[in-house]
Image (tube, grey):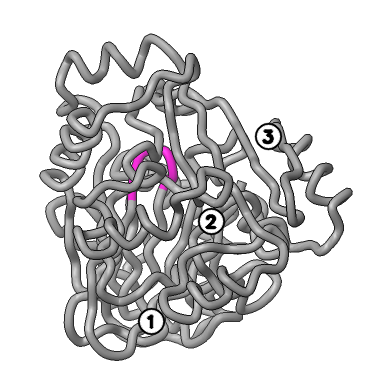
Amino acid sequence: MTSEFSVKTSGLFPKMIVANRQYPFEIFLNYLTANKSTLQALLLKHGALLFRNFPVKHCDHFAEMIQTLGLGSFVNYIGGDSPRDKVNQHVYTSTEAPPSFQIPLHQELSFVKNHPRHIYFYCEVAPKVGGETTIGDARQIFQAMPEKTLQKFQKQDLTYTSRYYYQSMIMKMLNRWQRSHKSWTEVFETTEKAEVERKCLDNEFTWQWLKQDWVEIKQNRPALQTHPLTGETVWFNQVHLYNFTPRLLGLKNYLGAKLFYIKKSMRLHEATFANGEPITKKNLYLIMDVLHNHTVHFAWHKNDVLVLDNILAMHGRAPFIGPRRILTAMTS
């Protein structure tokens, strides 16, 4: 790497790349171009790169940095159900989930075939209390899973089921109280049913239109993934997020969700084994224990950019108090 930039390590995960002084944005882009292969090798080795003290001042800088890194083409957030706002053509807010809610580790869209290969986060407003974008090494998490759990999840695929509304006063009231359940117009970024069906076909989803223009989406995916370049096997699923438990939601929210989603046809999502067998709470809690034990926290600084290999590294979010604005984008 050029002498103008220093690299220091914080426990190797994430690998921190820190500019030794401020430079014009164009110089930063030149640095990215000149060191592209080195940065890509670092990302494959560590799974996570954190750029700090670089002149990434706003959303457009963030998008241009991603393009210059050249890890892939931008992809939109199609098929995901995390509440997000679209900032520009390819950039979103990271999540609009309530500040008190802790989001456990996961890989982005690991429940779809065409999942992003990389995900990027930009700190526009750094939280003062909490609010870290937590990360975890998926290789270590795979190795730490109990043998019986691994054997169970290796034997068969998982079935993910999601249900989305079109127009619903009840859902709008819920989202005003706690933004949590998206409509299919938000999930698929269209108001046309034919376009929803086309995107389902592209992603190998099966779909069924329900009463009152609800749609049910199903997809079968493996619980593990092999990295296409390193050949490493990692834990790669979201069963712990797709199945509501007191540990995920907190007891109060869990009891509220049980009452609100008493009709299965309205339930946001669920995951089972592909043969229809439920995933036991015991297994879900074992998985969550491993994820919790491998969660890494680092404090955001304004204008930080975090780059993750979306197979090798997981991410989540810690609860926070006060202002926080983290932007995100994905590439194929």
Amino acid tagged 3: Phe
Q: Label 3 belongs to which residue?
A: 205
Q: Check disc 1 and give the amino acid type.
A: Asn
Nearer-N-terminus badge (3/2): 2
Task: Name the residue at 19% across, 58% down.
Answer: 251
The residue lying at 46 percent from left, 66 percent from top is 180
Task: Name the quarter where the N terminus is drawn.
Answer: bottom left
Q: Is residue 28 above or below residue 112?
A: below
Q: Where does residue 112 sit, x and y in percent of width and height? A: 57, 37
Real-space Cα separation, disc 3 to disc 2, in angstroms: 14 Å
The image quarter containing residue 311 is: top left
Q: Is residue 242 magenta?
A: no
Residue 81 circle label: 2
Please tell me how crowded label 2 is: few (under 14), some (14-19), or many (20+) other residues with Cα within 10 Å. many
Identify the magenta region: 309-314
| Residues marked 3 and 1 touching at CB (< 8 Å) | no
Dot 1 or dot 2: first in sequence order is 2
Check disc 1 and report the residue beneath it: 303
Q: Are marks 1 and 2 in contact (CB under 8 Å)?
A: no
Q: Position of residue 104 (x, y in %)?
A: 27, 53
Q: What separation in Å lies between label 3 and label 1 (alpha carbons)? A: 37 Å
CB of mark 3 within 8 Å of CB of mark 2?
no
